[in-house]
Structures are given as structure tokens and as C-alpha cells.
């Protein structure tokens, strides 16, 4: 992954906790990034006026990997 694609989360300060003693969930803190999943190659996204060719889909897949996606949903192969 190239240097300009890296996201530096440290530049954002943590939020100030809200002390609500009668509730448990406001005290929970997210300490890891969420799981991101690309759905750009699903069959519904291929129902365009000019659908992508196999070569374009492969290029899109490679680009998604390059920017760091670990999960990529793809459509049914014969759908488009």
C-alpha cells in the first residue's frame, strides 16, 4: 500500500467520556477499526448501462486489494 493511502488515526483525539452511571454501553470504547467490506463488484452493481468487462472487474479487484480491503463481495459470475 502506498504511503498516501495510509490513514493515521492518531491525529484525532479520543472523545471525552460521558459519565452515565445508570447505563453500561456508554462506557464501552471502540479500540479497533471496523471491518470494511467492498460491495463494488456485486452483481447488482453491475446492472449498469455499460457493464464492466472481465478485464475491468479484475482491475477493480486489484485496486481494492491495493487500497487495503481484506473482504470483497463479488457477484454471481454468469450474472454479468
Image (cartoon, rainbow, N blue to C red):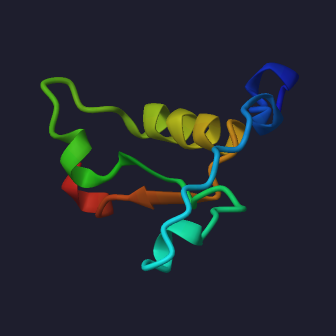
Question: Please, which residue is most extreme toward the right here?
Answer: 3
Above/below status of 21 relative to 3: below
Q: Quadrant of residue 8?
A: top right
Looking at the picture, how far across and down is residue 14, in whole percent? Answer: 71, 44
Q: Residue at x 38, y 47 (%)?
A: 41
Decide if residue 40 is on the left or right side of residue 59: left
Between residues 65 and 24, which one lies in front from this camera angle?
24
Decide if residue 64 is on the left or right side of residue 67: left
Q: Residue at x 29, y 64 (%)?
A: 76
> Which quarter of the rendered picture does the N terminus lie within?
top right
Looking at the picture, how far across and down is residue 73, in whole percent? Answer: 42, 59
Looking at the picture, how far across and down is residue 6, in whole percent? Answer: 79, 31
Q: Residue at x 16, y 31 (%)?
A: 48
Looking at the picture, how far across and down is residue 32, in whole percent? Answer: 70, 61
Decide if residue 32 is on the left or right side of residue 54: right
Between residues 33 and 52, which one lies in front from this camera angle?
33
Amino acid at each position: 500500500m502506498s504511503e498516501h493511502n495510509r490513514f493515521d488515526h492518531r491525529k484525532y483525539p479520543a472523545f471525552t467520556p460521558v459519565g452515565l452511571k445508570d447505563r453500561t454501553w456508554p462506557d464501552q470504547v471502540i479500540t479497533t477499526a471496523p471491518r470494511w467490506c467492498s460491495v463494488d463488484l456485486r452483481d447488482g452493481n453491475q446492472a449498469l448501462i455499460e457493464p464492466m468487462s472481465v478485464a475491468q472487474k479484475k482491475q477493480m479487484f486489484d485496486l481494492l486489494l491495493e487500497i487495503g480491503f481484506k473482504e470483497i463481495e463479488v457477484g454471481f459470475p454468469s450474472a454479468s
